[in-house]
Amino acid sequence: MNIIDQGIGPLFMDPDPDKARAFFRTKKRKMKNKVMELKDAIKEFVHDGDYLGMGGFGANRTPVAACHEIVRQGRKKMGFAGHTATHDMEILSAGEVYDRLDVAYVVGLEARGLSPCSRKYVESGKVEVTEWTNYSLTARLKAAAMGVPFVPIRNIMGTDTFKYSASKIIECPYTGKKLAAMPALYPDVSVIHVHEADIYGNSRFKGIAVSDLDLANASKRLIITTEKLITHDEIARDPSSTRIPFHLVDAVCEVPFGAYPGTMPYEYFSDEDHLKEWMSVEKDSEKFKEFLDKNLYTCADHEEYIARNGGSAKMRELRVKEMLIYKEK
């Protein structure tokens, strides 16, 4: 195949599907009880040096509790897929968890503004960065889920993003047209937060999936955090609602309000005041250190973090706000 041009960014993960399959052949796919405490799941399945993927979209259905636990346990030198990463990126940057970053949408917290912490860390020189677009990372996960080494797209060409990516411009063998080849991305471990799951890992979530279904299929190890556990009988009564099947899942962790302070569609709205507080204290290194000590390092778990920020009363308030939004629609 004729390679016309290529980006100068490093490729952090091997796109070879046969090497990925060698791992997947050894993965245990039994329908067994996979329920674990979150801290135990992070300890067992998330390792220094791993490449990490996070589910959700922006601040919606983001596995915040898992991000906190990864930082608490001191993970370092990880790769990270910055695919619509907002508050999760902020948390991981605060802990300097990653040193390799596939960057698409990061630093910004959408309409909330830019994270000083994320920006400072990415610009610190401690992080090796390769640029992509959001769609590029989507295509890379799609390639991995399909079990092919790349997929061709028509996005990214003619831009500086291509220049600093690890993509290649190839000639289509059928038409002679130029296409951008997106290399498959197989994360070592990923975390996806869902609305419901059974003890085996069959998972349901509401709202948009973005790339979570491909992320689940592409990831070598997958931790599911769930708002609540439901019975397998409930799953079996409506199998078409299962979006992530048990055989992809390594651990199931029940973490109510696990996306807080982000939004869980149809469950609770984001805590905009607390997100604003995060971004405000990041501007002062001493205040930010105190803030992290209070809200992350000295919290035993996500339940204690929520208790320190309004507890059940705050969550009831955010639940009502989310319901009012959908009522107005």
Image: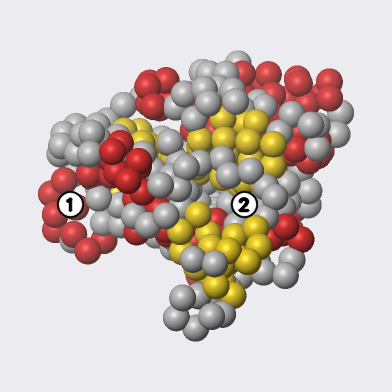
Residue 166's disc is 2
Q: Which residue is mark 1?
A: 234
Task: Give the amino acid type for the residue marked by disc 1 in the picture.
Answer: Glu
Q: Quarter of the image holding residue 78?
A: top right
Indicate the quadrant where residue 76 lies: top right
- Residue sitting at x 57%, y 35%: 79
Q: Is residue 161 above or below residue 41?
A: below
Return the disc, 1 or 2, that comes first in the chain's sequence: 2
**Where is residue 213 shown, x and y percent of the image?**
38, 56
Q: Residue at x 67, y 55 (%)?
A: 7
Q: Which residue is situated farthest in the right direction here?
A: 284
**Residue 75 horizontal side relative to residue 254, left or right:** right
With respect to residue 178, does 191 lie above or below? above
Q: How is the image coloured?
A: secondary structure
The correct choice, above or below, for 146 with respect to 74 in the image is below
Tell me which residue sits at (53%, 59%) in the image.
Answer: 182
Nearer the viewer's eye, disc 1 or disc 2? 2
